Each structure stands twice: as structure tokens, then as C-alpha cells.
């Protein structure tokens, strides 16, 4: 193993020509190195970096130098034992070389395109992002994660497509994981209407996973962005999938689960989103469909919104006019009094005021004024014989 | 019109042979009369009766006597103007005669079978109930209202049947409104498994409405009960349908809406149930189905439970074991550490401890103990060459 040299010269060599100041270069290079040394979500590394900066943290960790109380002795010792076996300068240089070859940008919190929403992850935030495509895509004004089961039903894919096309068509960035099923349906619908879409991968941004979605992932990179916190070459392990979900949740203003089995990984994404205070929605489906069981589970047990259409999603993120939704009540005046008058009338028989009052349970004077209202509305007609409904189809619903 | 005589003799004549004391007889007769005089839910009459008793309240209202401050002068005046046009002794006697002919029992709050749950309606509680069938059926230990759209889908009817059969089969009384669609499916499924079921009608208990469900209503009466607060002969007006819904909600421990259009009357039942503090559930369905739009509306805007099966309903009314429902989280130890070790292993290649530690991001000692756990579980095997997964299909889910 070659020792990692945390100097401006080494950083400039590894990152290629740059007119950035030394401290920026060192920070960028150190974060690239850290993303190789740690597994995603390593909060101990996160706290060390927050305390000392990425470069100094790396320098001290490599040298076993004192860390000014940023970590407990045991955290530091255990951390170094996790990190050091991977501390090979050649591996870091190789990852940066692959990134250049694939036009993968290395994004750090100092960059303007860095999604500030990631701050909500605290020490578990990624140390950097490797981005293939348009780096400005990953911190949009409005982003919604549309996620769900790989084993989606035709219903689920249809709903994901409709929702994604509607949202992306109105400028909302659709974030997902490029998996089969719901993820792919969401990305494809966004692309089909030239809308913005971002895929967060568990493995390196240079590796299309799943392989069957290679063409889709390339298409996303061409107009949107492919993002990973693990360096190029990293394989998509189960752990990284689970941690990838927290990135999807964090870079989005809200997360919608379209279909999910009882133990679907999408529930993990929902859980991450709720943990950092994001709104979460679940699309219901037939209770007889196993593909919706996870969504119904969310609706039963978590503070999530029932989502039926793109408007419901826009309401979650605070855009678009919400439909007034109050339930019909039994508050009496004025329509309920009229209901009872209508009940008391016939379209076939003329009835006098007192008969109508008795049938409706209204006082005679009240019945007369209510009949007057219906007369103005053209619902009833009057004659010497009394009152009757203007004959036409009068549907009754109960 | 014949004046109503509120005396024990008149009560005995109208009600037929009885060994009940005079005051009980008068109360019963007066409530029968009140149910003819008022429309369902008349809270002014309800307060007057609560204050003076049904007999005295009727006597004074007929005589325009002082009511001891039970009502404001205007309430009393307006009330009398509503009630008196219907105060014909012949009509009351006729209703009681029809009731006897149809074996319809007149139930009042003094009767042991009176559902005390109705007290939650306060002054809007019915003054009496007219019951065809088994009067002991209407105040069971466990009752659930299963209601929904008349224009139900095959999906909705299927769910209503499964849920009703499961609940009724376990002794829970299924309450509904005998309408087409969801109501009928719920009653039929309960009857099919010899379970208890009750139908609350908007018109008189002697009148089958809708006519197409006459045979169903007769079958319910034969083993369960048909209930109305309006006297025999009363027609099922729109007003009475809306008020009927409050009875369905009140006599049930919880209300489940299986399918409902955006403006379905079932939402009115849900609204009544919520207003008196009952738990309400809604069954989700495809967001593409108009027949589920009302259920989704409830789930979006009201504090209702998402109901997927009979177990969910039993949980609402506090019986049956609830399934533990916590979401899968990312809390690390112990399974997540194992996840990363599993990620670092291969079924095809032997890897040594340090290689596994580096790949998993664990310290070498930690990797060794975690490998020991997997070895005990039979997931990995070891040799001089290192460790590998015991070769078999290892599904990955994300």
C-alpha cells in the first residue's frame, strides 16, 4: 500500500490541473480519499471531518495524531482500525482517474451545486458526491423522490408514470434509484417529457446497476444526473443500497412511495425521510395486492400522506392550489331545510302549504319561505292547487 | 285531526295489553307519538324530553303549557309550529297498529335492549327505535358498521364480503344500511356465515327499501334486526337517509367505509362517527378508481385508519392481537454490521480476514467476531484460504 500524502502538491497531481487555492484542493482531495476509506454514513468520520476539516482529519487519522477531543479514544481507535486498511494512495488516485475518464465530477460542500438539503443528515451526510451528468441538477428548487418496489404491478408503474410525468412536466425534479419497477417508470416518464430527473446509485457512478437499466442510466446522465457517494468502481452492496436511500430522501423535498411490498427497501427510504423531517406520501392500492402492502403499512402506522395524484404531491411540497377538502356535514341551514321541503314535494301531485309543512316537519310559515326559494330556483311550480316539483329526473342518493 | 290523549288509559289502548306500570306505559306511548311528530334528529324535542320526560313534554307541548325554561321562547314556539301539524292521535294509533301487525317492537331507553351507545348523540338521539327481528341484536358487545357506495366495484364488494364474513364469523355484529352495493355485500356475507347483522333503515321498519333488497331485508329480520327511528309507514326521504347514517354510526363501536365516491353518503356516516368520537376506518383502493375516491379523501383529510383486513378492524375496536408494525430502521447493531460482512464475502472466492475487513469497512478484529457469528449461523465456512459464503442462492433486495 502507498501512503496517502495529504498535501497541495499531491492533491494537484491527483485532481489534475486546477486554479483552485491550496486549501480548497486539499479539502477536495481529502474528501475523495475519505469516500474511499469509509462506508457510507460513517458518523464518526463525519464528526471528525466537521471538527477538523477533511484534510486535517485525514492527516491526523493517518498519523494517529491527537484529534482535539473530537472523538472518544475508543471511537478514534475503532475508526482508524476501520479506515486504515483501505488507506492506499494508489486506490484513491485510481478512483480519481476513472472519474476523469467517465466525466464524473467530484462535488464537495464548498461547491455551489452541493445540495444543502444534505445538511439535515448531520454527521451522516456524505463527505462528497460523485456526479455523472449535469451537477446543477442535484440541488433544484423542487425535488420529489418517487420510489417503490422493483416487483411493481402494472397499476403501480402506471401511477408512477402519470405522477412523474405530471411533476417533471411542471419543473419538479424527480429523484429515484434507477432500479427496475417503480424507479425506472418514474425516471422514464420524466425523461419522456424532457423533465429533470436524478438517479442516486449505491455503487460507483461509472457502474450502471442494474445492468438491464444501463441505457436508462446513460440517458439520465445525458440530461439529468447520476449521483453516488461511493467512488467510481465501488460495487453496489446491500449496505450501500440502504445508505443510498438516505441520500434519495435527503436531496428531495418529499418522498412518495408508489408501491412497496411488506418489507420493501422503499420503506427504508420513507423511514430515512421521516427521520430528517421530510414529508412522506404513500400511494394506496387494492388491499388485495401484495405490491401495495408496504404503502398501506405506512398509511396505518406512520405520519404519511395518502397520495392519489400529482396535485397531492405538489400540496406536500407547498406548491399548487389545494382543493378544499372539508367533509360534507349535516349542518342544517340552509340546504338541509330545503332537502326536507324537496322530500315533502311530489312531481306528480299538487300539495298545499300545510300538507308540505306537515310532511317536512317545518312550521307552515317556514315551509312557505323555503318553497319560495325553490320557486326562485325553478325547482318547484305553484298553482291554485298548491305546489309541486317541476317534473324532471330527480336523482336520489343516500 | 283527533287530539292526542297522553294518559295511561290511552297508552294502554294504543299499545295493547301490558302489565307495565302507568308511567312506563305513558313514556312508551309518548315516545311513539314523538317519533311521529318530529323529524329525526330534532334536538329541540330531544332537550324538551330530556328535561320533562317524554309524556310530560308531549302533554305540555300539545297544551302550549310552560316548559320550565327547558327551551327558549322562540325554540318552543318554532318547535310547536313544526310538531303540532302532525299531532293526530289516529296517525299514532295507526303506526302502533301497523307495528303490531308486522311484529315490530317499540324500543325505548328504559328497555334493557336499548343501545346505550346512542346516548353519545345527546339531544339528537332517537326518541325510540322500531325494531323488526331480534331486539337483543341491536346492542351487542361488539358492533362494526361496514358501509359504502351503492355503485360499488367488484373489488369493493369482494373486500366488504371478506371483511364482513371474517368479523361476523368471529361474533362481531355487522351494522349497515341495506342499500345496494357495499351495504348489501356486508349483510349477505354476515348472513352466509350465520353471523349477527343489523340494518338501519331510513323509512319505516315495515317498508323494505330499496325494494330490490326486500328478500335480503326479510332475511336480516329473521336472524338479526331491522331498525328505524321513524314509525312504520314512514317513507325513506333524503333527510331521513342522512339522519339514518348517524344511527348506524352511533350503534357501532367503529365505522369502516369500504368504497365511496367523492360525494358518497358514506362520508356522511363517517362524519357522524367522527363527530361522536368513534374510530373510523377507510379501505384504500386503486387511485384510478372513482369508487375509492371518497375513501382516499377520508385518509387524506380526516383522522381515520387505513383498513386492509378484518384484523385491522378488530384492532380498531380493541380486540385481537395487533401485529407489531414498527418500520425497519437503520439502527446499526447487530444486523447491519453483519450485512456489511455478508456484502464483503463471496460464495466463489475464499477471502482472508483482512481483505474482508477492508471490503466491509470493519476493523479486522470486529470482522473476525462477525465472521464467527455467521459461521455459527451456517452462513459462511472457513478454511486455510480464509472465509466464504456457503454457496446457495443469496437474494439481494434493495
Image (spheres, coloured by chain):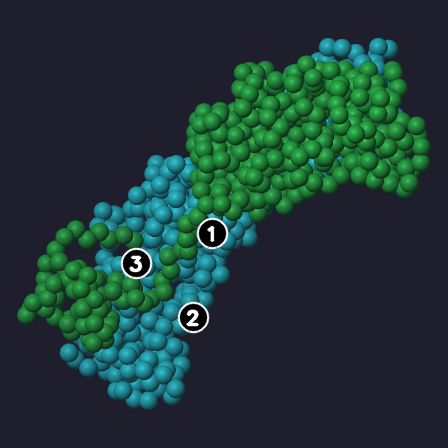
Chain colours: A green, B cyan
- Residue B309 showing in the rendered view: no
Name the mark nearer the viewer: 2 or 1. 1
Looking at the image, is A359 positioned above or below residue B267? below
Seen from the viewer's position, the closer of residues A200 and A329 is: A200
Which chain does the residue under circle 3 lie in?
B
Which residue shows up at 45% across the image and 25% down it?
A192
From the top left corner, tell me how far across and down residue A227 is, in percent: 64, 26
Within 10 Å of disc 1 (Cα), the crowding (few <14, some 14-19, many 20+) is few
Residue position marked by numbered label 1 in the rendering: B301
Task: Identify residue for label 2.
Answer: B122
Chain letter of disc 2?
B
Query: Which part of the image, by quadrant, shows the N terminus of chain B?
Result: bottom left
> Which residue has dot 3 on it?
B241
Judge from the rendering whether residue B343 lies leftward or rightward of residue A309; answer left or right.
right
Residue A306 rendering spot, x and y as whole percentages: 49, 44
- In the rendered image, which quarter is residue B35 located in? bottom left
Name the chain letter of the residue that bears numbered label 1.
B
Residue at 81% x, 29% y is A22
The quadrant the C terminus of chain B occupies is top right
Amino acid at each position: 500500500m502507498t501512503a496517502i500524502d495529504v498535501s497541495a502538491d499531491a492533491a494537484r497531481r491527483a485532481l489534475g490541473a486546477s486554479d483552485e487555492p491550496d486549501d480548497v484542493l486539499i479539502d477536495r482531495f481529502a474528501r475523495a480519499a475519505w469516500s474511499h476509506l469509509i462506508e457510507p454514513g460513517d458518523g464518526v468520520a463525519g464528526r471528525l471531518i466537521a471538527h477538523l476539516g477533511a484534510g486535517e482529519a485525514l492527516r491526523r487519522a493517518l498519523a494517529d495524531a491527537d484529534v482535539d477531543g473530537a472523538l472518544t479514544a475508543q471511537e478514534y481507535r475503532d475508526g482508524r482500525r476501520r479506515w486504515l486498511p483501505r488507506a492506499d494512495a494508489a486506490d484513491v488516485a485510481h478512483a480519481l482517474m476513472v472519474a476523469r475518464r467517465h466525466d464524473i465530477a467530484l462535488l464537495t460542500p464548498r461547491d455551489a451545486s452541493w445540495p444543502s438539503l444534505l445538511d439535515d443528515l448531520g454527521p451522516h451526510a456524505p463527505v462528497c458526491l460523485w456526479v455523472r451528468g449535469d451537477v446543477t441538477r442535484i440541488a433544484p428548487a423542487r425535488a420529489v423522490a418517487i420510489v417503490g418496489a422493483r416487483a411493481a404491478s402494472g397499476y403501480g408503474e402506471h401511477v408512477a408514470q402519470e405522477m412523474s410525468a405530471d411533476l417533471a412536466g411542471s419543473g419538479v425534479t424527480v429523484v429515484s434509484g434507477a432500479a427496475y419497477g417503480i424507479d425506472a417508470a418514474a425516471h422514464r416518464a420524466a425523461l419522456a417529457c424532457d423533465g429533470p430527473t436524478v438517479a442516486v446509485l449505491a455503487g460507483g457512478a461509472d457502474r450502471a446497476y442494474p445492468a438491464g437499466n444501463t441505457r436508462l442510466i446513460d440517458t439520465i446522465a445525458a440530461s439529468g444526473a447520476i449521483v453516488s457517494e461511493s467512488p467510481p468502481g465501488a460495487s453496489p452492496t446491500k449496505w450501500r443500497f440502504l445508505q443510498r436511500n438516505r441520500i434519495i430522501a435527503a436531496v428531495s423535498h418529499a418522498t412518495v412511495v408508489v408501491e412497496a411490498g411488506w418489507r420493501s427497501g422503499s420503506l427504508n427510504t420513507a423511514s430515512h425521510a421521516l427521520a430528517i423531517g421530510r414529508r412522506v406520501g404513500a400511494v394506496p392500492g387494492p388491499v388485495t395486492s401484495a405490491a401495495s402492502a408496504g404503502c398501506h403499512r405506512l398509511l396505518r402506522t406512520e405520519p404519511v400522506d395518502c397520495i392519489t395524484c400529482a396535485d397531492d404531491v405538489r400540496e406536500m411540497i407547498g406548491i399548487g392550489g389545494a382543493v378544499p377538502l372539508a367533509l360534507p356535514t349535516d349542518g342544517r341551514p340552509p340546504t338541509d331545510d330545503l332537502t326536507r321541503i324537496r322530500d315533502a314535494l311530489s312531481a306528480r301531485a299538487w300539495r298545499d302549504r300545510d300538507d308540505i309543512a306537515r310532511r317536512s316537519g317545518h312550521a307552515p310559515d317556514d315551509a312557505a319561505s323555503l318553497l319560495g326559494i325553490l320557486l326562485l330556483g325553478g325547482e318547484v311550480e305553484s298553482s291554485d292547487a298548491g305546489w309541486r316539483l317541476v317534473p324532471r329526473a330527480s336523482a336520489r342518493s343516500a
